[in-house]
C-alpha cells in the first residue's frame, strides 16, 4: 500500500521544521515546494541524508515544480511575507492574499481531492480568501492558529500552576491575533479539576495576557517569528487527518451557524480525520467568551474584504 503524501508549500524555517518532524514520524512521503530555486532541493537532500540515523524510509524531495506535488493527500501552505516596517495591514493582506490564492489554486489543480491546512498569516483571513477564490467545502480547508495559541496557553498554565503540561486541559478559540484570540477559562482544567479552583483570578488573567502576547514576545527576543512550536502544532493537525485519528483540536473552520456565526473562519474545536474537518464541536462557553468569538468573526470578514484578489 503506497504511503500518504504531504506537500509543504514554503519551506523556510517553519516549513523546513515541518518536513523534519514528518521525516522523524515516518508515515508519509514529503514534497518540499518553494519558488526559490535550489533551496527546497537542498533542504530535502539534507534531511534525506539523516534517514539512516532517524530510521525513516519515507521519500522526501524538494522542488520548484507543482507537478511534483500531484496526488497529495494534504497540502500545508506556509507561503507568505511577514509584515515589514512601513507596511500597512492592507499591504500585508493584499500581498499575502495574492500568494495564497495562487498557491491554493495550484495545489487543487494538481491534487483536486487534497485537504489544505492554511498556515500563512493573517491566517483566518487567508482561509476566508482562499475559500472565496476556490469554493472549497469547509471540510477540506482548515486553518492552523488555535493549535499554536493553545500549546502556548497550556505551557504557561503548567508553569504557573507548577504541574505537568500533560495534565493541563485548555484551549484557545477565536482568531489568531493578540486582539481576537479567546483563551478559554471556563472550560480549562488541570487533571479534570477546574482551573478556577487551581489558580486565583489574577494569576489566570496574567497567563491569558501572556498567551495573547506570546508571538510578540518571541519576535522581541528573536527578531523574527517562532517556527518550532508552529511546526509541531501544524503537524498535530496533519497527523490526525492522515492517520484518521479523529482528534478534537482547536483550529480555524468556516462556521455555518455555530455560536450564531455564519460565513466566517473562526477558531473552534473540531474533529479532524480522513475527511478533514468532520465535525465542529460547539462547546458551552461563558457569554463573554462567545462574544469574543463573534468579534473574531467580524474582524476576519472585515480584514478579508480588504483584499483585492
Image (cartoon, rainbow, N blue to C red):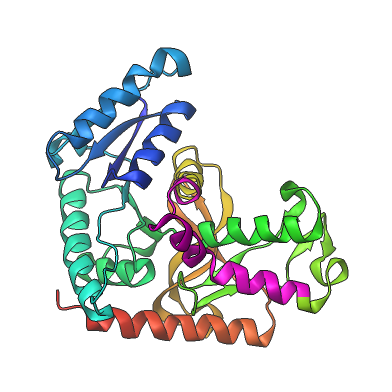
Where is residue 139 drawn, in percent x and y?
A: 40, 59
294 vs 108, nearest the viewer: 294
Please state the horizontal and vertical placement of residue 87, each as a whole percent of the image. 23, 75
Q: Quadrant of the C terminus?
A: bottom left
Residue sitting at 14 percent across and 43 percent down?
36
The residue depicted at 34 percent of the width and 69 percent of the height is 122
Q: Is residue 55 visible?
A: no
Q: What is the quadrant of residue 287 in the picture?
A: bottom right
Q: Is residue 40 above or below residue 144?
A: above
Residue depicted at x 67% and y 60%: 156
271 or 186, nearer to the observer:
186
The dominant secondary structure in magenta is helix
Q: Which residues are magenta?
A: 203-231
* Residue 299 seen in the figure: yes
| Residue 128 left/right relative to 307 | right
Q: Is residue 87 above or below residue 74?
A: below
**Residue 264 is drawn in which quadrant?**
bottom left
Residue 140 screen position, x and y as percent? 36, 56
Tell me, yes or no, whether the highlighted magenta stretch contains residue 132: no
Amino acid at each position: 500500500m503506497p504511503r500518504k503524501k504531504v506537500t509543504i508549500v514554503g519551506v523556510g524555517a517553519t516549513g523546513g521544521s515541518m518536513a523534519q518532524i514528518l521525516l522523524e514520524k515516518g508515515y508519509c512521503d514529503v514534497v518540499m515546494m518553494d519558488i526559490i530555486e535550489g533551496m527546497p532541493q537542498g533542504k530535502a537532500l539534507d534531511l534525506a541524508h539523516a534517514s539512516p540515523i532517524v530510521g525513516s524510509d519515507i521519500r522526501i524531495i524538494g522542488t520548484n515544480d507543482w507537478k511534483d506535488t500531484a496526488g497529495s493527500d494534504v497540502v500545508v501552505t506556509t507561503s507568505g511575507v511577514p509584515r515589514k516596517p512601513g507596511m500597512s495591514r492592507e499591504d500585508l493582506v493584499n500581498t499575502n492574499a495574492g500568494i495564497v490564492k495562487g498557491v491554493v489554486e495550484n495545489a487543487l489543480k494538481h491534487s483536486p481531492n487534497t485537504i489544505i491546512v492554511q498556515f500563512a498569516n493573517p491566517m483566518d483571513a487567508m482561509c476566508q480568501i482562499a475559500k472565496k477564490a476556490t469554493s472549497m467545502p469547509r471540510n477540506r480547508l482548515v486553518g492552523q492558529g488555535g493549535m499554536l495559541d493553545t500549546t502556548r496557553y497550556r505551557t504557561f498554565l503548567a508553569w504557573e500552576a507548577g504541574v505537568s503540561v500533560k495534565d493541563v486541559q485548555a484551549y484557545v478559540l477565536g482568531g489568531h491575533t493578540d486582539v481576537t484570540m479567546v483563551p478559554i477559562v471556563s472550560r480549562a482544567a488541570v487533571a479534570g479539576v477546574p482551573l478556577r479552583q487551581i489558580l486565583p483570578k489574577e494569576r489566570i488573567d496574567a497567563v491569558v495576557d501572556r498567551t495573547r502576547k506570546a508571538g510578540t514576545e518571541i519576535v522581541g527576543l528573536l527578531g523574527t517569528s517562532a517556527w518550532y512550536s508552529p511546526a509541531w502544532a501544524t503537524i498535530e493537525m496533519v497527523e490526525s487527518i492522515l492517520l484518521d485519528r479523529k482528534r478534537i483540536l482547536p483550529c480555524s473552520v468556516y462556521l455555518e451557524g455555530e455560536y450564531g456565526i455564519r460565513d466566517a473562519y473562526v477558531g473552534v474545536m473540531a474533529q479532524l480525520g480522513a475527511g478533514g474537518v468532520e465535525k465542529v464541536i460547539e462547546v458551552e462557553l461563558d457569554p463573554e467568551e462567545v462574544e469574543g468569538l463573534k468579534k473574531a468573526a467580524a474582524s476576519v470578514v472585515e480584514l478579508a474584504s480588504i483584499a483585492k484578489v
